[in-house]
Amino acid sequence: MLGYWTEKDFEVFETPGLEARMALLKERVRPKFEDLGNYFSAFFSAKGTEEFHPHVAKHMRRTVNPPNDSWVAFAPLKRGYKAIPHFQIGLWESHVFIILAVIYEAPNKPEMASRLLDTAALEELPGDYKLSGDHMKPEAEFLETLGEQGAEKLLVRLRDVKKGEFVLGRHLSREQAVALSKEQFHTFAEETFDQLWPVYEALLNHTKIQQP
């Protein structure tokens, strides 16, 4: 059985040089992000709250340093996604990530953090979920390792610090990812997004996203 992700996908991020890495990223990984973008935009839209749109990372601003990760994001806005909570599927050299994120560009982080602090949404998640306060780094801590106090500290930082971020989801190691078929990966990602959905709704307080 052929895996959906392959070693060659991960090796892209070991390739030196911006041009060489970007060429391989476009050849090997971006077609999968486009495919996942179409599939999971329909998956989120079917939940009936908003129409979701895919946003495949293009890394257009890079002129020297090659990207260390890449992704497709899902959000109910056609143009941009960074200012609102969004879902992502992406790759680092070491793993696949399937996440819900609020990053520093979001203008209403304090309100969203306060909503999560007032709910038990994180406590409902299984033990293999990871939480991070920086979307630029591959590392994240298991929720059960962080404990209630650790998660609360990160949410307080999201609320009070301009650069505070919230990145929550599951990781598949390189070895785990290459062992999954396309159908198995879809199933895993769907399960993850379904379990993250109540956290997403808590962040938004069921507020409709307005199109610009």
Image: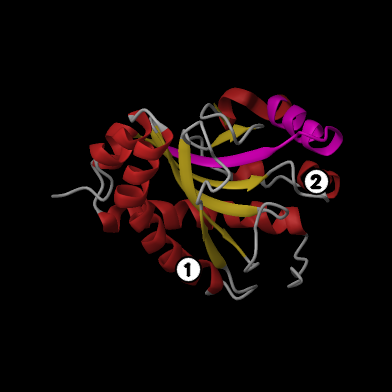
Q: Quadrant of residue 147?
A: top right
User: What segment is highlighted magenta in the picture?
Assistant: 150-171
Residue kind at label 2, given as amino acid type: Lys
Q: Residue at x 59, y 41 (%)?
A: 168
Give 58 or 144, whichever is nearer the viewer: 58
21 part of magenta stretch: no
Give 163 or 181, whichever is nearer the viewer: 163
Disc 2 crowd, CA 10 A, few/some/many (<14, 14-19, 20+): many
Left or right, residue 36 beside residue 47: left
Disc 1 crowd, CA 10 A, few/some/many (<14, 14-19, 20+): some
155 part of magenta stretch: yes
Q: Which disc, if any, is residue 109?
A: 2
Q: Residue at x 38, y 31 (%)?
A: 93
Across and down, in percent, residue 80 comes to: 65, 59
Label 1 element class: helix
Across and down, in percent, residue 119 comes to: 76, 47
Residue kind at label 1, given as amino acid type: Phe
Contact between marks 2 and 1 (CB within 8 A): the answer is: no
Q: Which residue is mark 1?
A: 43
Label 2 element class: helix
Q: Is 54 rendered above or below residue 150?
A: below
